[in-house]
Amino acid sequence: MRGILFMALQDFLESGLEPGGLWEPAAVAAGLQGREYDPEEEYPDEEMEQLILAAARMTRGSREKILESFGRHIAPGLLDMGASLGLLQEGWTTLDLVEHLNTALHPAVMPEVEESPGIRTLRLSLGEVAIAYFSKRRMCFFLKGLLQGFADHFAQPLVIREPVCQIQGAPFCRISVILDDPELLRRIDIPREFGRIAREKEELKFFNQLRGAPVAFSGWVVSFTADEVVVHCHPDQIAAMLDEGRTTIAAPHMALGMIAAVKEATPSQGQAVLHRLVLADGPVGRRENDRVAPHRPVIVQCLVDERSIKGELINISTGGVSFRLAGEDVLDDSLLFANVSGELTLHFVGERKGDKGGSGAGGIRWMEAGELIGPQRVVFGGNLLELQDDGNRPMARVVFSRMDPSSRRIVDHYVHQRLVEAQSGPGESR
Ligand code: HEM
């Protein structure tokens, strides 16, 4: 461990605890009397452990309590360090720091290692980030203290949950950090969500009522700023938006719908400016991440942290895939949240044996414009969200983070088609 952390501990034991002035006695008790630390040098982890245990004995507290207070104490100093190195972006708060830990923060302060060993993080939504901590230093309480310290700094209440913990004997800790603020939880980060919608050319669906009748057309994003979004849609939809003064929106990558107020709207041009966007209470327009099972075996091929694995698709949604590992492939918990890149081929109607030119159960079937037929290759990027072993073969769930527009369209169509089939009964299933 780097000297900088020992120096921070010295500062904490001198002044950050009641009673203060504990550095000298703790160093004596740890057998480290007179030891000096250089911020850039590496020192044995055991020395940190002995100092923490000595401080715990002296304050009649626990190792965990000391680590937590230590983390809370040094959070402002780490923020200063991050800011002086130009690592922090304007507007970042705790969840953004955690999200960018392994991309922007730790690699810059620990240049000799590419990725901070022992911590992986994954932003699950605007209001929640998940952490997997499996450092041999077993300092999850330091991590939770840091989070509290950041939350104090940004005056942003957080709920921190740790359902699985190393200290309780688990191989790693799983920590969720959630904004404890209903207002903020409902807020939508427009550049983040609409940046993705624009990049992946996602089709939006709008929901309104016009004189009591539901109106729901698809549309797309023309442009956006941090506060508003310009959308293009059918003139009837825009007229209904204008009439209601608001609209509900479903975006394929979002589990929850969005509600937006209409700032301006020109039905004749099929254009509206929307603002004051918040998350809806639930999914809208059946766009929730329904998981659908394939109608025939589908092989999923993935690269997880440069390890090649293969599995059979269990289900797929617009947000991710679950598959059962094949052969001898294994994945262990240390790969939680790891980057995944993969591919699979989905089969659309028209490809069945005996089918001719896309006709359905023996009869003629009209194809709709843009409908997909035959095998379609999907390429995805994502993160390993879950690993389960039900005694059969291990199952993995990958949450999508990157997908090119054509793969996105294939997955959307496939999920939609399977849902329609499920609703129309087993006779229709393919
Ligand atoms: C604000 C920017 C940050 C800076 C400048 C920073 C810097 C550092 C430094 C210099 C160390 C000592 C590394 C060593 O001994 O080799 C460290 C350790 C650590 N940091 Fe950060 N950090 C930042 C943000 C965070 C955040 C947001 C988290 C938590 C989610 C975090 C969690 C940790 C943990 C748990 C350790 C102990 C390492 C271990 O268990 O092996 N840090 N950090």
Image (cartoon, helix red, strand yellow):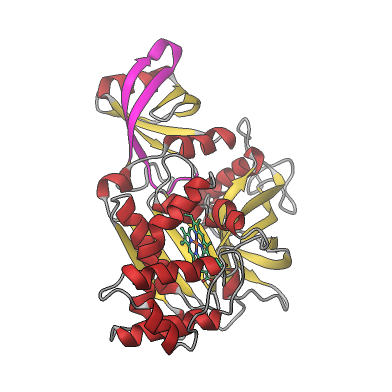
Q: Is residue 197 visible?
A: yes
| Quarter where residue 260 is shown | top left
Instruction: Residue 136: give x, y in percent of width and height.
Output: 55, 79
Nearest to the observer: residue 297 or residue 252? 252
List the single residue furthest toward the top.
268
Residue at 27% from the left image edge and 24% from the top image edge: 245
Quadrant including the C terminus? bottom right
**Drawn side of residue 344 relative to residue 135, left or right:** right
Instruction: Residue 423: give x, y in percent of width and height.
Output: 45, 51
Q: Is residue 272 magenta?
A: yes
- 69 in relation to 263, above or below: below
**Drawn side of residue 370 relative to residue 283, left or right:** right
**Drawn side of residue 259 relative to residue 392, left or right:** left
Nearest to the observer: residue 199 or residue 122? 122
Nearest to the observer: residue 361 or residue 389? 389
User: Which stretch appears magenta?
Assistant: 253-278
Residue at 32% from the left image edge and 68% from the top image edge: 15
- 120 in relation to 55, above or below: above
- 283 in relation to 159, above or below: above
Residue at 25% from the left image edge and 74% from the top image edge: 18
Quadrant including the N terminus? bottom right
Nearest to the observer: residue 377 or residue 3? 3
Instruction: Residue 250: give x, y in percent of width and height.
Output: 42, 39
Residue at 63% from the left image edge and 45% from the top image edge: 360
**Drawn side of residue 364 relative to residue 96, left or right:** right
Q: Is residue 289 visible?
A: no
List the single residue furthest toward the front.
34
Instruction: Residue 207: give x, y in percent of width and height.
Output: 36, 33
